[in-house]
Amino acid sequence: MPDIAKPYPVTVGGNLPTKFQGWCQAQPVIGDKCTRCLLCWVYCPDGAIRQAGQRLVVDYDYCKGCGICAHECPINVITMVEVVREQSDE
């Protein structure tokens, strides 16, 4: 089967994870009071939210910093934190 005809790898929930390229201004942080309602996971367009034991975590290799997860969180436990990058001398 040619590569163009192969189906995309879809995660549970229907998201298409793609590697992040490093352009976002903020990234989500899930607080300790998370009730694991999974709305952030459902709405994440990048498939970046994963369950790790009894917690939900953000996989920053895939997160693009859109903030949809924080917006959809019913108890506002997800905060968007500014990404600080080191300045290069190039």
Image (spheres, rainbow, N blue to C red):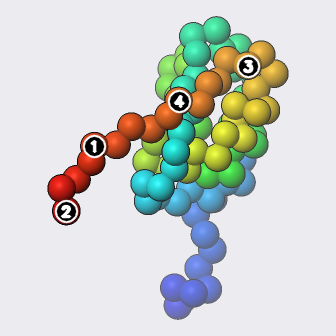
Compare marks 4 and 2 and give the one earlier in the sequence.
4
Q: Report the amino acid beneath label 2.
A: Glu
Q: Is residue 30 above or below residue 25?
A: above
Of the pair 79 and 58, the residue shown nearer to us: 79
For disc 1, the marked residue is 86
The C terminus appears in which quarter of the rendering?
A: bottom left
Disc 1 and disc 2 in contact, CB within 8 angstroms: no
Q: Residue at x 61, y 86 (%)?
A: 5
Compare marks 4 and 1 and give the one earlier in the sequence.
4
Q: Report the amino acid beneath label 3.
A: Asn
Where residue 84 appears, as percent x and y from the top left, is 39, 37
Mark yes or no: residue 50 visible. Answer: no
Compare marks 4 and 3 and give the one earlier in the sequence.
3
Of the pair 68 and 58, the residue shown nearer to us: 68
Q: Is residue 73 above or below residue 84?
A: above
For disc 4, the marked residue is 81
Q: Residue at x 58, y 45 (%)?
A: 65
Disc 4 and disc 2 in contact, CB within 8 angstroms: no
For disc 2, the marked residue is 90
Disc 4 and disc 3 in contact, CB within 8 angstroms: no
Mark yes or no: residue 16 visible. Answer: yes
Q: Secondary structure at mark 3?
A: loop
Question: Which disc is residue 76 wearing?
Answer: 3
The N terminus appears in which quarter of the rendering?
A: bottom right
**Mark-to-mark CA distance, 4 and 1:** 16 Å
Where residue 9 appears, as percent x and y from the top left, is 58, 63
